[in-house]
Amino acid sequence: MLAFFLMQGLLFGIILCIAEIPLSIPFLYYPVSFLYHIAFIFALIGMKRYFVLENTGEVLSRINLANRITLLRISAIPSIFFLFFAINLILIRWILLIYISFIFLTDFIDGILARTLKQITKIGRYIDSSGDYLILFFTSILYIYYSLIPTWLFLLILARIFTIAVTVVIMSFIKNEVVYTISFLGKASVFSLMLLFSLKLLPLFGVNNSIFTLILSICEYIIGGILIVSLGEKVILVVKAFLIKKKNCERNGNRE
């Protein structure tokens, strides 16, 4: 994580040299990014027991390639966040478009690598989902601030992330361990939002004709529908888990 911090800091420094970014931005960026990476180190240490291969239970001797790519996506969040404050510069817009698209693409690269190289780990599932929702959370805040997405979609995204957090807490309490449930609807909502966020940057480059605007509006409503259905799925999941827990408790009570 410290290596990723240095890499992100170097990249930000290069951008600072080639673009006329106000000095107040890097002045805040570097300490915030450092504290962010330190906090994530402690989070990873706290989840050390999950650094095992799912199929064999073998403990990892080092972080594998798939997880490194996931951590790269998580590490990029402060850089993306602070670059947005200089979005009025055309060069920064191009950098953001390319960088955000690349970071979103890593969400698919790490999964493919994990399956192909047989590197599927418990920690990989946790940090992959956490990374997705962290970057969507901070990106959606920036997008609503710059009026790139409608308020109703922003509130739905927040509701989705809040529901995920509550579901993880409840399911972990029921099963006595950290539980991340990954479903098709969940992955579809993440994929569709990442694609929409990439397309939403295009109007900053003058791509804002009526047809393109109509297509984006239709996509927003479709994604909104996916988010609503996904919210319902999580509620059903928690209810089922509670019912199963209650049934098991009653069964154990009857046996005693």
Image (tube, rainbow, N blue to C red):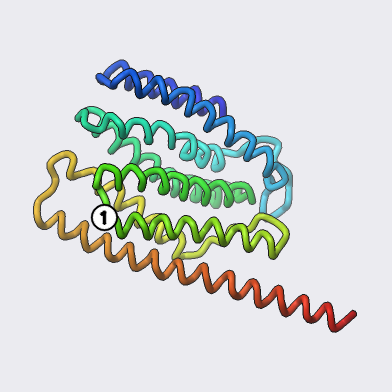
Amino acid under label 1?
Pro
| Relative to 147, 100 lies left or right | right
Q: Where on the picture, by quarter, is residue 219?
A: bottom left
Whether 4 is drawn above or below 249: the answer is above
Please tell me which residue lies in front, 11 or 244. Answer: 244
- How far across and how far down the image is residue 249, in percent? 77, 76
Residue where numbered disc 1 is placed: 150
- How far across and how far down the image is residue 169, in percent? 62, 58
Residue name at image x 90 percent, y 79 percent: 256
Question: Element under label 1?
Answer: loop
| Relative to 5, 86 lies left or right | left
Q: What is the residue that sits farthest to the bottom in this orientation?
A: 254
Residue name at image x 52 percent, y 51 percent: 129
Q: What is the residue that sits farthest to the left in this orientation?
A: 210
Quadrant in which the N terminus appears: top right
Residue name at image x 15 percent, y 60 percent: 214
- How far across and how far down the image is residue 47, in percent? 67, 44
Whether 147 is drawn above or below 235: the answer is above
Residue name at image x 66 percent, y 77 percent: 243
- How far across and how far down the image is residue 143, in percent? 30, 45
Whether 167 is drawn above or below 252: the answer is above
